[in-house]
Image (spheres, rainbow, N blue to C red):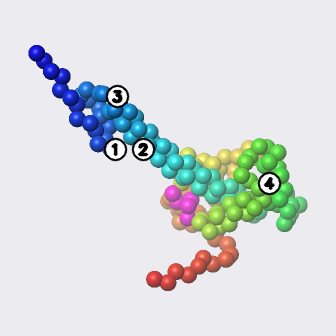
Amino acid sequence: MIVAKKAAKPSAGELQTSGVFDLESLARSIQTAHKELAQQAARAINVSLTVRNWVIGHYIAEYELNGADRATYGDKLLERLAVRLQELGVGTCEKRQLYQYLRFYHTYPEIVRSLTAQFKKLLLNSSTGPVCSTNAANCRSTNKNCAPQRRPGPKPPRRDL
């Protein structure tokens, strides 16, 4: 008589890929895959949102420096932009958030160094033409003079070690 050998149950985080599956092993394998991929997705979303916020700040800063009608808006730029973005259905772009994106961009200009080619395209592509006053394809990756200029602002808190 041949007796089926009972498969060892995979430990937490281990995916069973061979041998005999029982219902518990199947459920645990699916649970492990779900947890790990959900964590990966959350990390990817966080990276994308960080880049999105930085790019929005970049666009606003470039507009402040080079926009054709920038003098018309003056101090009301973020207020008027927030209204227009709301009309276009762009979420999380109220005046206060736009200011935070701009401040984030000025505080962390070095983020441009870590942008992938996919994100660097965002610095050049817009419906009205190039947005970046620098050559975004070379931004900091090969040319250190291509970095956005850091504007004076509130100094970060001092960290005494």
Q: Is residue 60 above or below residue 20?
A: below
Within 10 Å of the Cα at label 4, are there few (<14), some (14-19), or many (20+) other Cα atoms? many
Q: Which residue is mark 1?
A: 13
Dot 2 and dot 1 residues touching (CB under 8 Å): yes
Q: Position of residue 45 (x, y in %)?
A: 55, 48
Amino acid carrying label 1: it is Gly
Q: Residues within 10 Å of mark 3 (few under 14, many from 20)?
A: few
For marks 4 and 1, give the one nearer the viewer: 1
Q: Give yes or no for contact between labels 4 and 1 (Cβ–Cβ under 8 Å).
A: no
Could you tell me what secondary structure mostly forms the magenta stretch? Answer: helix
Residue 82: image tag: 4
Disc nearer the start of the sequence (3/1):
1
Tell me the residue that label 2 is attached to: 36
Sequence-first tag of 4 and 2: 2
**Nearer-the-camera pick, 120 or 154:** 154
Q: Residue at x 38, y 33 (%)?
A: 27
Crowd tier of the residue under label 1, counting other residues whose Cα lies within 10 Å: few below 14, some 14–19, many 20 or above: few
Distance from disc 3 to disc 1, alpha carbons, whole Å, reads 17 Å
